[in-house]
Amino acid sequence: MSKLVLLSIVVGLVVIPIWAARQQHPLRGLRMALLGLATFHLFYAFLVRVVVPRLG
């Protein structure tokens, strides 16, 4: 399970910018990418701090 958590960083760092690049306005795409990455990093920090230790 911890390998999946580590792999999710790679997937998140690739998928979120691709998702944000679909916007027609570049500034809106940049804002969506930054917001998406910030949200993803908060979720990842929660996974690492709370979920992974309970799996061990």
Image (spheres, grey):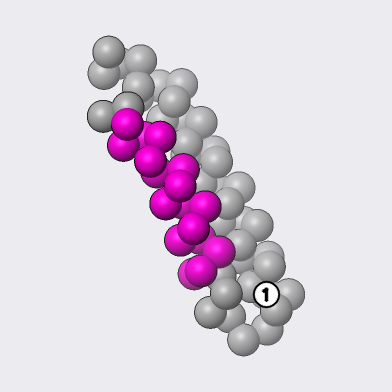
- Considering the image in quadrants, where does the C terminus appear? top left
- Residue extending farthest to the bottom is 24
Q: Write down the quadrant of residue 6 in the picture.
A: top left
Q: Which residue is mark 1?
A: 28
Relative to 38, is 28 above or below? Answer: below
Relative to 22, is 46 above or below? Answer: above
Label 1 neighbour load within 10 Å: few <14, some 14-19, many 20+: some
Bounds of the magenta segment: 3-19
Horizontally, residue 22 falls left or right of residue 8, namely right
Q: Nearer the viewer, residue 45 or 9?
A: 9
- Considering the image in quadrants, where does the N terminus appear? top left
Residue 18 part of the magenta segment: yes
Q: Nearer the viewer, residue 42 or 3?
A: 3
- Helix, strand or loop at label 1? It is helix
Q: The disc labelled 1 sits on which kind of residue?
A: Arg
Residue 27: x percent and y percent? 73, 75
- At 52% from the left and 52% from the top, the residue drawn is 13
- At 58% from the left and 80% from the top, the residue drawn is 23
Relative to 46, is 56 above or below? Answer: above
Residue 16 part of the magenta segment: yes
- At 46% from the left and 51% from the top, the residue drawn is 12
